[in-house]
Image (cartoon, helix red, strand yellow):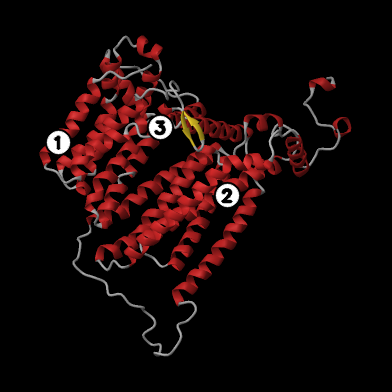
Amino acid sequence: MSAADGPVVFDPADFGAIPSPRSLRSWMRKTRRRRADRSFWQIFEDVYLVLFTLAMAAASGGNVVRQLNENAAQCTLWSCAELTFWMPWILLPLLVATTLRVSLSIGPVSASRAGGFWLLASPVNRSGLLRPAYWVVIAVVAVAGFLASALVWALLGSMWFEVVGASLLSAALLVCTACVAVWAQQKSRRSRWALRVADLLLVAAVVPALLLAFQQPQQTTLTAGFVGFSTIGPYAEPPLLTTAETHLLLVFVVAVILTTVLVVVTAQTLDKLSRTSVIAGGELLAGLAGAASSLDVSMLADVVAGRHWRLKGRVRSRRGRGSRGGALVYREFLRILRWPRRLVIAFALLVVPYAVAGTGFDEVVPIAAGFAGFVAVRPMMDGLRSVCRSTGLARALAMDLRELRVIMAVVPGLFAALWALLALPALGSGPVAFAVAAGVISGAVRQASARPPSYAGPLVASPMGAIPPGMFSQPIRGFDLLLLCLAPALFNLSSTWILAIPTFVLVVMFAVRPKTD
């Protein structure tokens, strides 16, 4: 057997020594800077306005959060204390499950197709090449987890020391979750089990929300005071840290040490990541960036769904039943069942109306249930969106597009009705539940059957450049009908109006033929 028949072996004598990942990244950085046609100040001029806008939004948003924190701290009702007690048991499972699902959807470690083809296929150590992307993932998860936790605990009226401490602990927990996601990315079997754990955490978050919602309210108030200072004399200075704050500080130090060790250990296992999973995450991020640039929310869902089915590869085929409309309804039912994790997430979103109802803000329950139901039902509209965006597919079905929209909305409509029925104890009345179901299905159908963004007509000048006017309507499509159906319930109108307006919206929605040009 000749040498050509054997496996390919890298011989340093023929090609030279294998470069280190650091030297390779340094060479690539110098090459890019040498060929750059824009200076730093030219780039800074473009991003200055964005940075200034973010700073202004953070300043104004921080002021609003501070005011809400002061108002919540003055609340002495029994419901406020119950909400403070149960919220961590609701928030932490939701944050961990969301981090797991989003991380495993993206990768979490990802690389572009070019980087995967030229770099990851080379004999250079893969762990060193993927480490910068890994640090970016850890930083993003830590910052996002800290901000989300700080917002929730600040709105509960906690003291700022407690807000910062709890947020840091939550961020450490989410960083550990991201490390687990990186470990699960190395094997497909691990990824499947991690997604199952995320589903269980979503279901677990529903339990405390139900307990909070169905507890009998008590007409008691809490007396404000500083527990622990009663034995201190009138002229004694308060201690620098209370006992609870000292325990929180010790727990935080231990959590930081354990998180740092886990992050460093996980960074040493990046060479076990397969090139396929890393490139798939890079393609998903590129597709999401393209969809976000056009402000098309439906395209974002299409990109995620497309990656899911490409990774799945194939499914077990089943014989259809019925003819014409009945056959399409049956196929839509099977298509939804082929992605059962969406159903788990949809039912887990029932935690939102029950949690809001448990806080005592009954006026906000319909709007919270409407948006949660919209998020639960919208992923089931992939078939309708494919038909409305493909003229050839609609012609192949030999049915009018108006009729197709009605048929393909049957199964999601039944699910929306079931979802609203399960949320009925939190909503409080049947007409409000009907308004929520009607708003959810009409809004989801409108968004799924909407036309692509229009780039025709004159551009509109903005501080970020010229923007086509058709792009402004993309993010609000669907939500406008949802708010219109919920308006009678929000304005506390009679049951007649609560039933009449959503019915009118549904009739008009399914009577008008969707536009495709």
Task: Please indicate whether residue 35 sits to the left or right of residue 512 in the image.
Answer: right
Query: Which residue has dot 3 on it?
Result: 472
Q: Quadrant of the N terminus?
A: top right
Sequence-earlier tag: 1 or 3: 3
Residue 489 is situated, as x and y percent measured from the top left of the image, at: 19, 43
Which structural element holds mark 3? loop
> Could you say which quadrant of the image residue 296 lies in?
top left
Distance of label 2 from label 1 (alpha carbons):
48 Å
- Measured as percent of width and height from the top left, residue 412 is found at 29, 30
Tag in front: 2 or 1: 1
Indicate the amino acid at tag 2.
Answer: Ile
- Regarding mark 1 in the picture, which secondary structure is present there? helix
Q: Residue at x 57, y 39 (%)?
A: 187
Q: Which residue is mark 1?
A: 499
Give the crowd class for mark 2: few <14, some 14-19, many >=20 residues within 10 Å: some
Q: Is residue 191 left or right of residue 76?
A: right
The residue that mark 2 highlights is 138
Looking at the rendered structure, the kind of residue marked 3 is Phe
